[in-house]
Image (tube, helix red, strand yellow):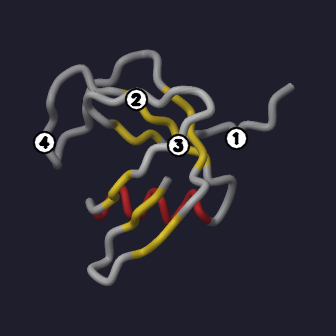
Amino acid sequence: MNNYPKFIPIFPLSNFILFPQTTVPLNIFEPRYIDMINDIMKSDKILGIIQPKNSFSKLKIPELHKIGCLGKVISFKETEDGRFLIE
């Protein structure tokens, strides 16, 4: 049995793959994703990263591929202009 949460927030990210045992810096600047990162930082710090099938606008929920990556935030920094730098 795993200890993963029942629900995992999804971060759609084009042209990106997260490989096992690697770290990747991400610059989070959109308000909806800043809110998502705030939420996961209060709990297990786990998020799903899945590529959208098409490009998408800020107002539309993207259609996602069926397989993605599971990641955990291990480093967090808030910038002076309100962005989050995570790894």
User: Which badge, 4 or 3, comes first in the chain's sequence?
Assistant: 3
Residue position for label 2:
50
What residue type is disc 2 on? Ile
Other-residue count near label 4 (Cα within 10 Å), few / some / many at <14 / 14–19 / ≥20: few
For label 2, the SS is strand
From the viewer's perspective, is the residue at label 2 or at label 3 nearer? Answer: 3
Q: Which of 24 and 36 is in front in this view?
A: 24
Q: Name the residue under label 3.
A: 23
Q: Residue at x 50, y 36 (%)?
A: 48
* Residue lying farthest to the right in this orientation: 1
Other-residue count near label 3 (Cα within 10 Å), few / some / many at <14 / 14–19 / ≥20: some
Q: Name the mark on residue 57.
A: 4
Frontmost of labels 4 and 3 is: 3
Label 3 residue SS: loop
Comes first in the chain, label 4 or label 2: 2
Categorize mark 1 by other alpha carbons within 10 Å: few (<14), some (14-19), many (20+).
few
Image quadrant holding the N terminus, namely top right
